[in-house]
Image (cartoon, rainbow, N blue to C red):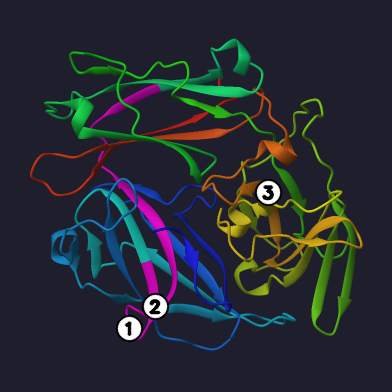
Amino acid sequence: MSNKIFLPNIKTVLFHREGWDLSPSLIKFNSVEKLKLSFDDLDADKKDYLYTIIHCDAGWKPSDLRQNEYIEGYFEDDIPEFDFSVNTIVPYTHYELTFPSEDLIPKLSGNYILKVFILQPDSICFTRRFMIVDNKIGIEGRIKQASNNEDRYYKQEVDFSATTSGLDIINPFRDLKVVITQNGRWDNALRNLKPKMAVGNKLDFDYDRENVFNGGNEFRSFDIKSLKYNTEFVSRIEKDYSGYHIYLRQSDRRTFTIYKKQDDIDGMMKIKTEDSEDTETDAEYVNVYFTLPYAAPMIDASMYIIGQVTDWQYSDESKMDYNYNLKAYEQTLLLKQGYYNYQYILRYFDSTAGDETFIEGNHSETGNSYTIYIYYSESGSGYDRLAGVKHLNSLDD
């Protein structure tokens, strides 16, 4: 199960730790931390949205647990907070939820899916992943250039160790599951990495090949917080009866270019308007036009716009169409005002993971965010407990 929007009227679904817009949807077990969910409904009416949660294993498949084993309180709850947009060309209704609520509380750590629906749970509007960590495993690590000479200038190595003194683990090679993600992507995640060595309660994961990622390149960006002027990567802004149209500058292929350091937010997006006071209800929805020149269409792969802007999903929305007249890939996204990161990623038809290096290039110097998740499958528990999480960045010393 993954983040997915099932209805075209649902836009700008955000799910993060309360008070930190660019954080992952992760909170600590038995803490006062909360998650904030927000989304817009372009039908611009009031609907009675409900939600429930589903406990999942380390691979994001539903656990065999019954709802009463992982939910305290009601199995379903409503989303009561909403406001209508104000003076926007594209009208919408903005909804918000603070979770856990008083009536629906997760009882276990691990992976979860939050499912939003109307009337019946099978009438799904969208789903969001979130995690609850019970910090019993300490993790220390660092990101460096790949150890192997052939990969040294292109890949990054994630070396780390784990201390399991908070748990009585009999067989860490069998009972622990390790997942490493880069920039919030799950399609290229490293899974099931086993300890290289175990000494007492310390586990070593210092490999040379098994724990490497493509360095890729810094994310492309565009700023549409204001519709009154063109920012760096905006070619022009047009307005007609249907709304605003933002044309980005034609993109360039960076496969063979020299690495150039530039600030980004690792594929995230920050929703904000500078043209009014209240971003949640005053920000406009605009059509954003992407153009990537390319001599001929790929016959064994598709081109996608990937980032939080498209939920990191290889979907119909993120897939680009080829324009034979312009000799370019194109796509248009309806987006709320803000600051966005994205990359052009190629995915071959026979692969589930995308190739960010084909268009963007590959450099070991790139700034990337990594997260290490360690799950513990205690014998007889029937679920994967999230027992340790560590965030690392390749730019950290």
Cβ–Cβ under 8 Å for marks 3 and 1: no
- Compared with 159, 324 (above or below) is below
* Nearer-the-camera pick, 165 or 58: 58
In space, the residues marked 2 and 3 are separated at their CA atoms by 29 Å
Q: Earlier in the sequence, mark 2 or mark 3?
A: 2
In space, the residues marked 2 and 1 are separated at their CA atoms by 7 Å
What residue is shown with label 2? 117
Cβ–Cβ under 8 Å for marks 2 and 1: yes
Amino acid, disc 3: Asn
Magenta-highlighted residues: 115-140
Image coordinates of residue 310 in percent, x first then y, are: 61, 59
- Compared with 110, 240 (above or below) is below
Q: Judge whether residue 230 can be spotted in this image.
A: no
How packed mark 2 is, by other alpha carbons closer than 10 Å (few <14, some 14-19, many 20 or more), is: some
Amino acid, disc 1: Gln
- Compared with 249, 370 (above or below) is above
Image coordinates of residue 232 in percent, x first then y, are: 86, 48
Residue at left offset 71%, top offset 38%: 358
Q: Which mark is residue 341?
A: 3
Q: Quick check: 315 left or right of 320?
A: left
> In what element is the residue under mark 1?
loop
What residue is shown with label 1? 120
In space, the residues marked 3 and 1 are separated at their CA atoms by 35 Å
